[in-house]
Each structure stands twice: as C-alpha cells, then as structure tokens.
Image (cartoon, rainbow, N blue to C red):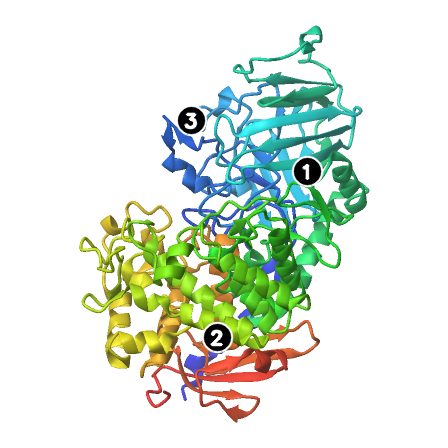
Amino acid sequence: MNLPKLLPIIYCLFFSLTVQAQKQPYQYVKPIIGTAKMGHTFPGATVPFGAVQLSPDTDTLSYELNGKYNKDMYKYCAGYQYTDKTIVGFSHTHFSGTGHSDLGDFLIMPTTGKLQLNPGTADQPQNGYRSAFSHQNEVVEANYYKVKLDDHNITAELTTSPRVGFHQYTFPKSDESHIVLDLMSGIYNYDDKNVWTFVRVVNDTLITGYRQTSGWARTRTVYFAMTFSRPFISYGQKNYDEQQVYKGFWRKFDETKNFPEMAGRKIRAYFDFKTEAGEKVKIKFALSPVSQKNALENLRTEIPGWDFEKVKRDGQQAWNKELSKIAVNTLNENDKINFYTSMYHTFINPTLYADVNGEYKGLDQDTHNAEGFNNYTTFSLWDTYRALHPFFNLIQPTRNADMVSSMLAHYDQSTLKMLPIWSHYANDNWCMSGYHSVSVVADAIIKGNYKGDAEAALAACVATAKHRSYEGIGEYMDKGYISAEANGTSVSNTMEYAYDDWCIAQLAKKLGKTDLYNEFIKRSENWRNVYDKQSGFMRPRLKDGSFRKDFDVLSTHGQGFIEGNAWNYSLYVPHQPAEMIALRGGKQRFATHLDSLFTMYLPDEFFAETEDITREGIIGNYVHGNEPAHHAAYLYNYTNTPWKTQERVRMILKKMYGPTADGLGGNDDCGQMSAWYIFSALGFYPMAPGSVNYELGSPAVINATMNLENGKTFTVKTKNQSDKNVFVGKVMLNGKMLDRKYITHQEITAGGEIQFFMSAKPNKKLN
C-alpha cells in the first residue's frame, strides 16, 4: 500500500464528511436545480406540501398565439426560466416540474417612479413594471428567496407558512413607491382565462378578494386576504376589459381611484407609498379555497405578527424535520445536494387544500370539511404513482393515507364516480392516460398504511376501471385492447390499464374478493393483445384485430403511445416482467434488447414533435426525462445479467441529475424524477407499486438511515463504495446473506440493516 499517495484521498474524504456533518439537511437544498431547460421547477419559497408556492415569474407569454398553441409557453410551466433576464413579479401558486400548467395567482410587484400597470416585455422592460435582475444578487434556499430588482433598486424577500405568503420589500427613498397587484397575470394564460376577479379594500392595510379562472382546471376559484405592514396613502385600479358589453350603473362612480370595490375580468390594482431609504414594506398574503373569511382566518392563525425572520426560520425547520427522515452520507457534497434537493422536490406536491378550520372546496364545488384527514390536491398521478407515492408509503405513510382519503373524497363528490386522473383545485383536468389513482390506493392498503374503509376503496377502484365511456375503457373491456381507430394513444392506454387492473386484482386478493381478483387478474394480461410478435414490439392494433401497417418503432409521435416510442413503452409491463420477457424470446435475447436501448442513438427527428422529450433526458434510446421507462434499468434483474441493472442505475444517476440549474434531464413531474433518484441512490426501487417488493440496484450513498414513522430505523450501508465501484458483489440483510434481487416492504418497516459490498467488477455468479 502506498500510504503517501493515499493520504490526500483520505484527507479529502475526511474533509468532505466533516463538512457534511456540520450542515443541517435543509442547507443542502438548492431549489435552483431544475429551473433551467426542462426541469420546470420553481426557485421560490414554500413549506413542505404547502398550499402557497411564492415564487418569481420571469415572463408573461400567452398560451395562445395567432389562434394556436404557443410552443414557447411550455418552458414557463413553473413561471420561471433561469436564462431570463427580467422578473415580472411574484405570484403565490406554482406547480413543480409539470409538463403542462395553470396557476400563477395574484402576482405582486414592487416598483418606484412613475406608476406603470403594464408588465412590459423581456426586450423592453422599461415599458412596464417588470425589472432586470442578476443571479449574482439572487439567494435561493428552502423557504426563502431573495433578489434585487435592479430597475427599481428594491430588494425583494419571500418566505411562507402553509397557507400564507410573506413578502418583504426594502425600498429606496422615493415619493413614488408602489405595490402592483396584477389580477390578470397567470401561468398558461390566455385572453379569456379570467372568468371574474373581485377585490374589496377593507381599510388602508387590509384587502380581500377572489379570482376565478378557466384553464387546465376549468372551474377554479381562489380567495385571498392581503395585509400591509403600514398604511398605503392611495390606491386604484385599471380595468383592461374592453370587450365587456354590460357594465350596469357603476359608471356613477369613478372606480379608478380610491374606490373600495373592484370587479371585472381584467384588473390590475396598485397601492401607493412614500418610502425612506432602507424602509421595508411587508405584505402577508393568505389563500383559501373556500372564502375571503377563511383566507383572513388562515392569515391571522398562521402568521399573527410581522417577524419575517421567524416565519423564514420556522419554515426552514419544518423542512429540516421532513428532510431528517433520511440521514445520508455521500461520496461528495454534490451527491448530498442532489439527494436532499430531490427529497425537497418530493415534499412539495401534492399540496395542502384545506383551510385551518378544515374546510375545502370539493369537486362538486360545494364546501366540505376534512374530518379525520388533511385534504390534498395536485395529483399528477401518471407520473407520481411510480415512485413518489411508494416513497411516501415508506417515509410519509400517514400523509400518504391522507392523500388516499383525499382521492376517495374526490370520488364521492364526482358525478362520474371516478377516482382522480390528474386533479388540482377541486377539478379533474383529465390529463395523461391510465387510471393510476388505483395504484396509489391499492399500494397504500396492501402496505398497511391506509386505515379507512378498504372495501369502499376497492369499490371506487372497480367503478373507475369499469367507466366504459372514459377513453376507450368500454372497448378495452370488450376486446381486451383499445383499437388504433378509436384512440391515438391506444397502445399505451391498453398497457397502462392492464397494470392498473393488476393493482385492483392485488387489492381484491388481499380483501378476499376472489371473483374480483379473477376478473382483474385476467384483465391485467391485456398487454399481450398489443404485442406484435413479428416486429417484437407493442404495436397499434385495428378494430379487425390486425396490426397497423404504418408503424415506426422510434418515433414518439402518432404511433399509439403517449409521450414515448415503441422501444420504451414496449417494456411497460412492470407487474409481469418475467412473462413479458418470455414472450419476447427469453432472458438472453431480452438482455441484448435492453443493451441496445441504452447504447443506440435516437436522432432528434424522432422526438421533435414531443415537447416533453429532449436530448438532455435521453441516454441512447432510453428516455429518462419522461416516465414510461423509469423501471427499465431494473428489468436486467429478470435476466441472467442483473449486474447491468447496477451499472445502468449508477450511470443514470450521474448523467440525469446534477447540482446546477440545468441539473434535471426532464420535467421533475411533481417529484417523480426526484423520487427515482432517492430510491436508486439508496439501492432499491418499487418497480410495480401494488407489490411489496423493491428491486435491488446499486446504491450511490456511503450509508443512509431511514427514520421511519413507526419509530424504527432502516439503514443502508456500503463497503468499498466509490464512483468506480458500481457493481454489487454481495448483499447482506440483518447480517445474513441475501440470495434474491429484492427486499420487501415489511423487511424495511420492521427496521434493520442492509449492506452492499461494492466492487469495480461485476459478480456474474449473482443471478
């Protein structure tokens, strides 16, 4: 051993571990990760699962351009793009990592000088209230955002409680200081998106109101209460709705200046101040799904005072509490940043959707009270059933049970009697395919986390899966597949329904419902009906039973799949991988096929028309930047080459995740991409939620301890860990050799220790 050569390496590792030990988990969070390119995350302030996401918006593009979809709008799903040079303002609601959008409610912008109520444009910011900014003057932390607005010489700071956004603006000396409240602004905005807005000036520090929009959620109403730390000296509004035909007799008043009631579709309001140099104007802005009264109660309950630093500190400690559920040591600080930022992103959505008194607006648009559970919204289920909700079943089981209760309340309030597909703010927007809420419901019950009426939950799953009029379900039930003539995503729909049906079968089995089990286990094999033996891929099938002749296995557009191609989607049989591999020619042939997936080249032309897939999210032909093949690397476990799972997983972790603004290879999709990272970095992954098994991979951590809700701990340890030692020589569970390629949910929740012995060479005897 050459000790002199090893000493610098030993010192660097020791120094890295020492620095890591000195920081708290929330201090490793970098919310700026994913704000460039395809990540679609936001950098602003929020608390875990908070109803408020207070964040800067950097442009005001319209969803519509010349009567068509404006493709440039896509990059503003979270309101912020890292490469932009100006900030329009700070709004209170944002999705994290989605590939479609809504929200951006109640934009606030502090300004100085001549009052301007138009936001201006990115190339001519001086023509509006927006401002230039620099990342050098930007501070981004968990539950804290700070930036200097260069054009107004104002320092903006943001923090939050669960239902309240807290603004702190430090002004220069000015007799013309303003706070602009833009009720027209929004994300994925269009000219008629605002159905109505209402503002009531209660006194010279308190404003209340609401906004109703028709966008991705077609019937969405958000109420607010807004209070200032000091009185404004005057206020006013401008109504930009030139198309409003009937205006009644309100013309008797001058509504533009110091008039205490504002109503219309296109309103921008303003509040005037005189400020001294360094003077702070603070704003507390509370939201409610139910009423102005509830919004005010939320505000007074959660943030009764004006101590900005306390609210910031309380929120960061809330983050610390959640992030401390896993204590991790990594090879370097960047890996730890990636890990805790991934945890941060997983704990943003779903979001709390109830007031402090328990009231919320239901799918029926009536007011309900969440009795015995916290109500949640923002269910991006096509993404999050895969790893996010399984992660919650380990780390947030009580919260995940509340989410299941929220889905079942959605079902009860639905006139269609369906569980949510993609729901937010008392609406189902019906985005994406499958009925994956059944996966989340089944997984929570099977793993013992949901304590409610399991039979009622099963009945809701069955009713959803038998809703014949929804996206081909009737034909699927009759023929065992959806025809290409009936649906443009017929193949992926058939495959996703089959997996969901398997989840229902597992739940029926657990509850002793043999007839239902037999019915749905049969349906779960319907993926076989779209497999074309001649091509070796899943393929669109016509009503007459023949396969469509015009077929391109590389293209992601118009081939029967949603946001994916045949190469990736043909692997989507997570519930019956061994059967799928046998149908495709056996283990050796399938392993060769997987090798090709990761090593071949997919030219840009094959995903040019699919905005959710870009070069940054692709390795070979494997698309990690979108979800359908997230389990693909773990399929090697079902061949004779499981060490390739280990190699591929570590490669993906390195290539698709980084501690920079462009550090995500695709949309984070409400935490799904981040949940994949966490599981894979820990060394195991839930390939088929609804099963109690987790596929083993190759951990990237040195060690990690999961502090479980039941008071027990489960520790992942590695020996000989390094960036080069990506292969697993052997695995020991609680001191005994593990002779299988999975661990179970019960083995984790019972507490214990799993140890991976790492190597630079694969153990080809480990089959």
Disc 1 and disc 3 in contact, CB within 8 angstroms: no
Location of residue 631 by image quarter: bottom left
**Pair 2/3: label in front:** 2
* Residue 245 in view here: yes
Q: Position of residue 48 (x, y in %)?
A: 64, 55
Q: Earlier in the sequence, mark 1 or mark 3?
A: 3
SS at badge 3 = loop
For the residues labelled 2 and 3, the Cα–Cα distance comes to 48 Å
Of the residues shown, which amino acid type is indicated by label 1?
His
Local crowd size for mark 3, using a 10 Å CA cut-off: few (<14), some (14–19), many (≥20):
few
Q: Which residue is mark 3?
A: 123
Of the residues shown, which amino acid type is indicated by label 2?
Phe
Q: At 59% across and 68% down in the image, what residue appears?
A: 444
Q: At 46% across and 41% down in the image, what residue appears?
A: 81
Q: Earlier in the sequence, mark 1 or mark 2?
A: 1
Of the residues shown, which amino acid type is indicated by label 3?
Asp
Q: Which mark is residue 684?
A: 2
* Residue 334 in view here: no
Which one is in front, 12 or 123? 123
Q: Which residue is mark 1?
A: 167
92 over 480 or under it: above or below: above
For the residues labelled 1 and 2, the Cα–Cα distance comes to 41 Å
**Pair 1/2: label in front:** 2
Which one is in front, 687 or 281? 687
